[in-house]
Amino acid sequence: MSATVETLAAADWRADFPALDQAIQGHPLVYLDSAASAQQPAAVIDAVARYQREDHANVHRGVHTLSHRATEAYEGARDKIRGFINARSRSEIVLTSGTTGSINLVAQSFCRPRLQPGDKILITHLEHHANIVPWQLVCEQTGAELVVAPINDRGEVELDSLLELIDDKVFLIAMAHVANALGTVCPVETVIEHARQRGIPVLLDGAQGVPHLDVDVQGLDCDFYAFSGHKMFGPTGTGVLYGREEILEAMPPWQGGGDMILEVAFDKTVYNELPYKFEAGTPNISGVIGLGAAIDYLQSIGMQTIARYEQELHDHMVARLEQVDGIRLIGQARRKASVQSFLLDDIHAHDLGTILDHQGVAIRTGHHCAMRVMQRFGVSGTCRASLAFYNSRDDIDRLIAALGKARELFG
Amino acid sequence: MTDAARDMQDLYRELVIDHSRNPRHFGRLEDATHSADGINPLCGDKLKLYLCVDDDGKIESSSFEGSGCAISIASASLMTEAVTGLEVDAARDCSSTITSRLTTDAPYAELAPRLEKLQALDGVRAYPSRVKCATLAWHALRAALTNDSKAATTE
């Protein structure tokens, strides 16, 4: 694909996102914060609105027409998710409130009943707080130990050190597929291969993986894959836990309530089959339908096209940022996706964020829910520009120009 | 200059940039009679404020240390300049005046001549996400004057 064709394509894609068509402080919006939350295409907004206007009712209950329509659309979205990540069966797609909900479910339902004092949960230094704190909680509850594999100065997991930490006491390995603060694509294939040899299950935090890579959970051979709808152009409050069917079968329910039961008596309840036994209560029906629409939209472009386009744009962004006087790039992994953290001179990240916002450029500033990553690089926070396929080279030009203005102001 | 550029310079006035680059009264005050920690959990700004109050209830000296954005450092620096030499009650009044100046839409109240410099912080009003950076030091001042041992937070 030539650069010209890609530029044209990005302009077309951008037009699909109504929120991008606005001016901030008199400048056309340049949205470089998709890693925090991605914008939604009109197809998603319309699907949610259509459901609210025409089809809303509770799912899995009632015989009336609206309930049937709502159930069809909701369960149809589950089928789309299954296809999108290539799970074997729809039973393996548990709908949650987000990546955080998915990881907590695994911590409390899979780990808590099984962990013994002295067992270990192995994570990496790159993790988002959502892939640290749920494990700390379950370790406190069971006497297990949280073990952290180190990263190097480029922001890559030190693979040899991680592999050395895998011993018979490791009960689960939980790591990011793509790290949120630095964009590092982690060597999950190698880790899974080693874990598999020892029969240790692996959970991947795919919050930043799914929007940017063509994810195939069977190809990855992971046991759990957790991700969020709102980072993949769907509504907030939606998420997915993929789990290998035989593991999910063996796990007890986490939360009790309606929808997760077959029969309730006061002395015993028979739980519903997969995946419903993990979905107590009325779910986020409209959000999940929106997530299904997001998947249709992404598949109409193709995840491989998206990944290729974004990689080219990411490399261009990094090359341009490297040329900026006074810049310090944080996170220079050899395999990276979509994200660059940086600092400029001694300007505090929040000041830089405000100055960029003033020029219509939206970036994330702060610790990115990854305080330990910040500590590793000796900073309290960074600026983070993160890309989606609706960004273009023009957006990068605007970012670079805005950084120049910041230097003038603080010069 | 566009309106947006003017607003930006209104936030990052020369005095603010100057005080953030060269904060006054920066460091620990060994003979402090009062101190308080201030934390802005949203931004990660942290500071510790020291006051030395004499027997007559006058703030003889003040200082601060910590890290944060230009707005929070400049605000702390300007504050220590403003309150040194004030009676404790006057410092409390000053804190209330400045906090309401920064956090409400009311017309700006007139400042005493010795506090006029604090107008430099006025630009922050137009930036709701940054107001807490500017008020942090003032929260810490109130906590120090009540000798509250709990860290003052902007939340």
Image (cartoon, coloured by chain):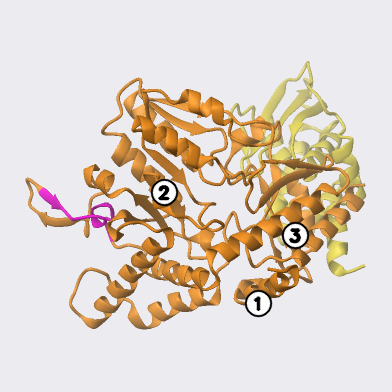
Circle 3 Cα neighbour tier, 10 Å, few/some/many (<14 / 14–19 / ≥20):
some
Question: Which dot, 3 or 1, sits closer to the camera?
Answer: 1
Q: Chain of mark 2?
A: A
Q: CA distance from mark 3 to mark 2?
A: 34 Å
Label 1: how many Cα within 10 Å (few below 14, some 14–19, many 20+): few
Q: Which residues are magenta?
A: A269-281
The orange-tinted chain is: A
- Work out whether mark 3 precedes mark 1 in sequence or the reverse, and give the earlier one: 1
- Per the model, the C-alpha gap separating discs 1 and 2 is 31 Å
Task: Identify the element where label 1 is drawn.
Answer: helix
Q: Is residue A83 left or right of residue A411?
A: left
Residue A37: image location, x then y, percent: 57, 58
Quadrant into which the C terminus of chain B falls = top right
Q: Mark 3 to mark 1: distance in Å?
A: 24 Å
Q: Which chain does tag 1 point to?
A: A
Q: Is A326 situated above or below A362?
A: above
Q: Which chain is yellow?
A: B
State the residue position of label 3.
Answer: A357
Q: Nearer the viewer, residue A270 or A354?
A: A270
Q: Is residue A134 magenta?
A: no
- Tell me if label 3 and label 1 are in contact, CB under 8 Å: no
Residue A362 appears in the figure: yes
Q: Nearer the viewer, residue A138 or B46?
A: A138
Q: Amino acid at mark 3?
A: Asp
Q: Can residue B109 be seen here?
A: no
Q: Which residue is mark 2?
A: A225
